[in-house]
């Protein structure tokens, strides 16, 4: 695997840790260099820059959002801050996990491995057709009425989970299966992703089950079918 790491005061240390656990690491400077390398990577590790005021620098969050929106690459952000609002903000723009540094090497590697299991552990070559909506897990592409619908990684993962389940899915289960059990992603972040999917696919696509979670509305089109390719 290859990890792209933005250069900062920890980069060399992180590089040594990851190489010591079998990763091939390509160093990238902050800014456009990291964004340009993202398509060639299985995982991007980005150190968020603090700004003079409380919170992360706007440029760091913009880079996170651009990588998450343009590339199908696992994305982990890191910072010195343990502020909940900042962690939620990083997750909302598309991170698969956010790490608070410093962190013991063994936990760092475990968290990276956990993200990679989540994003690569699903079966390959599976496609769903739900009326005019088509979801392809192998290519991670979604189309509606034959028009491609761009989704972020987390939006796709959430849609795939809901569309593959006949009943409602609890917020706790969604947090576990899409965000790896991060409880900060179970409220504001989840609601944001649901609203994004409704905006892109139709307001009635995802139904809120009050006090529990969400379910995917399948009755509006022909019964969905799964097909294995390859």
Image (cartoon, helix red, strand yellow):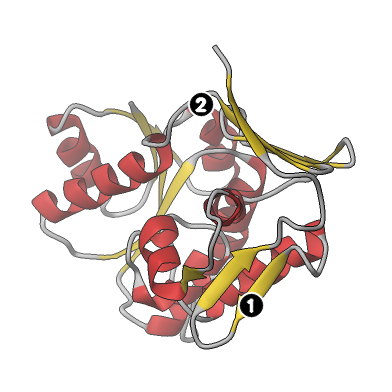
Rendered location of residue 102, percent (x, y):
19, 64
Residue for point 56% across, 38% down: 72
State the residue at coordinates (62%, 60%): 62
Quadrant in the rendering for residue 93: bottom right
- Numbered disc 1: secondary structure: strand
Relative to 186, is 115 on the left or the right? Answer: left
Disc 1 or 2, which lies upstream in sequence? Answer: 2
Q: Is residue 127 visible?
A: yes
Quadrant the C terminus occupies = top right
Classify mark 2: residues with Cα within 10 Å, few (<14), some (14-19) or many (20+). some
Number of the front mark, 1 or 2: 1
In whole angstroms, how far apart are the C-alphas of marks 1 and 2? 38 Å
- What residue sits 69% from the left and 42% below the top? 224
Q: Quadrant of residue 203?
A: bottom right
Residue 15 tag number: none
- The kind of secondary structure element at disc 2 is helix
- Tell me the residue that label 2 is attached to: 40
Where residue 57 appears, as percent x and y from the top left, is: 53, 70
Q: Residues within 10 Å of mark 1 (few under 14, many from 20)?
A: some
Q: Which mark, by number, is residue 208?
A: 1
Q: Is residue 91 above or below residue 120?
A: below
Residue nearest the viewer, comparing 8 with 45: 45
Question: Residue 205, position in %: x, y?
Answer: 75, 63
Say left or right for 149 vs 84.
Answer: right
Q: Say which residue appears at 79% left-offset and 68% top-offset.
A: 204
Residue 56 coordinates in the image, percent (x, y): 49, 73
Residue 87 visible? The answer is no
Q: Work out whether residue 107 or residue 164 is closer to the camera in this orientation and state it.
A: 164
């Amino acid at each position: 695997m290859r990890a792209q790491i933005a250069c900062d005061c920890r980069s060399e240390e992180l590089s040594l840790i990851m190489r010591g656990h079998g990763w091939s690491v390509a160093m990238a400077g902050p800014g456009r260099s990291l964004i340009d390398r993202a398509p060639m990577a299985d995982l991007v590790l980005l150190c968020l820059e603090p700004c003079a005021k409380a919170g992360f620098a706007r440029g760091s969050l913009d880079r996170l959002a651009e990588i998450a929106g343009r590339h199908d690459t696992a994305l982990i952000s890191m910072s010195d801050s343990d502020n909940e609002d900042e962690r939620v903000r990083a997750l909302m723009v598309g991170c698969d996990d956010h790490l608070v540094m410093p962190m013991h090497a063994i936990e760092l590697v475990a968290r990276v491995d956990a993200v990679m299991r989540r994003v690569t552990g699903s079966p390959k070559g599976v496609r769903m057709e739900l009326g005019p909506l088509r979801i392809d897990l192998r290519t991670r592409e979604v189309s509606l009425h034959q028009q491609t619908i761009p989704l972020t990684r987390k939006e796709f993962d959430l849609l795939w989970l809901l569309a593959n389940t006949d009943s409602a899915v609890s917020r706790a289960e969604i947090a576990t299966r899409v965000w790896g059990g991060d409880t900060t992603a179970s409220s504001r972040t989840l609601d944001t992703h649901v609203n994004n999917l409704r905006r892109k696919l139709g307001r009635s696509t995802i139904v809120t089950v009050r006090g529990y979670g969400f379910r995917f509305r399948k009755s509006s089109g022909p019964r969905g079918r799964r097909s294995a390719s390859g």
